[in-house]
Image: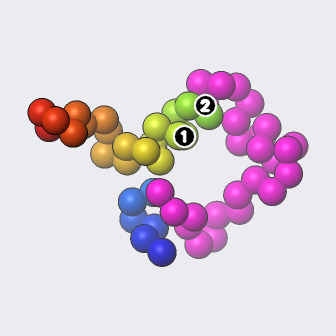
């Protein structure tokens, strides 16, 4: 498990296990999108073609 990249679960973090907990983490779409963007591009978006 590589925790430093932010793409894998971290030890000590209690992730949402229920719909109610999920809604507390992500009460609106922009917060959910921000989280998914951090997972996909932990160092910010970089074009794979031009860098």
Residue at the image position 65 percent from the left and 25 percent from the top: 29
Q: Is residue 12 left or right of residue 37?
A: right
Q: Is residue 44 left or right of residue 36?
A: left
Residue 39, compared with residue 23, is above or below; it is below
- Badges 2 and 1: C-beta atoms under 8 Å apart? yes
**Count of marks, rendered view:** 2
**Principal secondary structure, stretch drawn in magenta:** loop
Give the numbered dot on residue 11: none
Q: Which residue is mark 2?
A: 31
What is the C-alpha distance between the residues marked 2 and 1? 6 Å
Extreme left residue here? Answer: 50
Residue 13, compared with residue 19, is above or below; it is below
- Quarter of the view holding residue 25: top right
Residue 2 placement (x, y as % from top left):
43, 70
Between 1 and 48, the one nearer to me in the picture: 48
Give the numbered dot on residue 35: 1
- Quarter of the view holding residue 12: bottom right
Q: Which residues are drawn in magenta?
A: 7-31
Question: Is residue 30 one of those drawn in magenta?
Answer: yes
Residue 36 placement (x, y as % from top left):
53, 40
Secondary element at image label 1? helix
Residue at the image position 43 percent from the left and 45 percent from the top: 40
Q: Quadrant of the C terminus?
A: top left
């Amino acid at each position: 498990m590589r925790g430093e990249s932010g793409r894998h679960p971290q030890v000590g973090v209690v992730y949402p296990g229920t719909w109610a907990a999920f809604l507390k983490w992500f009460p609106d779409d922009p917060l959910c999108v921000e989280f998914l963007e951090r997972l996909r591009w932990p160092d910010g978006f970089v074009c794979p073609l031009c860098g």
